[in-house]
Amino acid sequence: MDNIDALDHVEHHRGGDGHSHEDGQANENQLGSNPPMIAVRLHRSTVPNRDGAGLVPEVMVSNDDGRHMWLSGVEAYRRLMTKIALEVVALRREYRSKAVLDGIDLSVSVGETVGILGSNGAGKSTLVETIAGLRRPSSGTVRVCGLDPWRDRARVRSILGVQLQDAVLHPDLTVLENVRLHRSFYRHGEQPDQLIQHLGLTDVARTRTQRLSGGQQQRLSIAVALIGRPRVVILDELTTGLDPEGRRSIWELIENIQANGATILLVSHSMDEVERLCDRVIVLDKGRILGAGTTRELRDQTGTAHLEDAFLKLRTQDTTPRRPA
């Protein structure tokens, strides 16, 4: 069950071990860090609330070993008030004993757009590929709408759209055939012809992918990421290879997606792009988060006037990670 939006699913639930956990209360040692919410119920308290009904919400969460437990009190209210689309907790990814990601904590709310800034080799691509389920964490947890992208790949693919720098597109298919093929993977989605038109690919719709320019292939990879009308979107170097007019048309398309409530994780080297599209920004360097906040907060934190200056100053400061993003 995905994260839910209201007080429903109040029936009896069973945990992954087959035993009832309806009356069990969770504690921090049992649950670990911020486990995903999967159900809500109303519980009659012995202490009446201000309305006299004595009903309080409890939230069912699932820990890493699959057991289901209930949270109540302040923690339950916190989980109800904040709808989380992406959660990354203590994420570590190693290659040959070298940490490419070193303890990443990241939380993205539903409908929020978060930008990731970092130099080459900072760990940006590894981070988004791990969130997308293409790489397995060495340790830590990743959740997309409450689902583990490594273990629950099929379910995550139905709600997650991914556009990566090295997107694999069938070279012998035309633009239209590629988009129609990917549309067939989803129960609901965009109309291929309309999306192709929005992305300025109508003139090459019947051209084979291998004959497209770099900018046209970039637009096609965006179309493939968006065709399933995903709830969460990962965009890696969104407008690389596009001319100024092309960049602005893509930005307008993304703003339309934002207006429809999509959650977006955007990797970019373009400060203008990040400032225009992102609600928050994280600065990544050597696999660690150096700073996080709105563009204004990062400028204020570093005493700079521009986001680019804030980015450069954070990289020259102590690399001890700041607060979680």
Image (cartoon, rainbow, N blue to C red):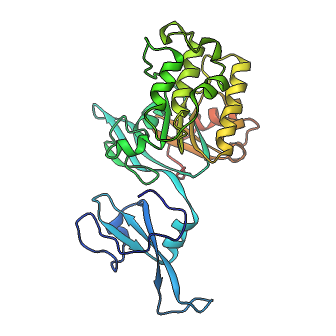
- The one nearer the camera, 159 or 324, is 159
The residue that appears at 41% across and 44% down in the rendered structure is: 156
Q: 323 or 219: which is nearer to us?
A: 219
- Residue placed most toward the observer, 52 or 192: 192
Q: Position of residue 316 (x, y in %)?
A: 58, 34
- Residue 317 or residue 243, whichever sits in front: 243
When asked about the image quadrant of residue 251, the answer is top right
Residue 272: give x, y in percent of width and height.
71, 30
Position of the N terminus, as image quadrant, is bottom left
Specify whether residue 237 is in view.
Answer: no
In screen coordinates, is 117 left or right of 135?
Answer: right
Q: Is residue 261 above or below residue 27?
A: above
- Vertical placement of residue 208 versus 81, above or below: above
Q: Is residue 86 visible?
A: yes
Point 51% across, 43% down: residue? 289
Residue at coordinates 58% horizontally, 39% vertically from top-left?
Answer: 317
Up-down: is 301 above or below 275? Answer: below
Furthest toward the top, the residue is 211
Q: Is residue 208 left or right of residue 201?
A: left
Q: Is residue 79 above or below residue 244?
A: below
Q: Residue 239: horizontal and vertical position, in percent?
A: 62, 24
The percent coordinates of residue 242 (x first, y second) are 65, 17
Q: Residue furthest right?
A: 305
Residue under the point 65% across and 45% down: 260
Number of numbered discs: 0
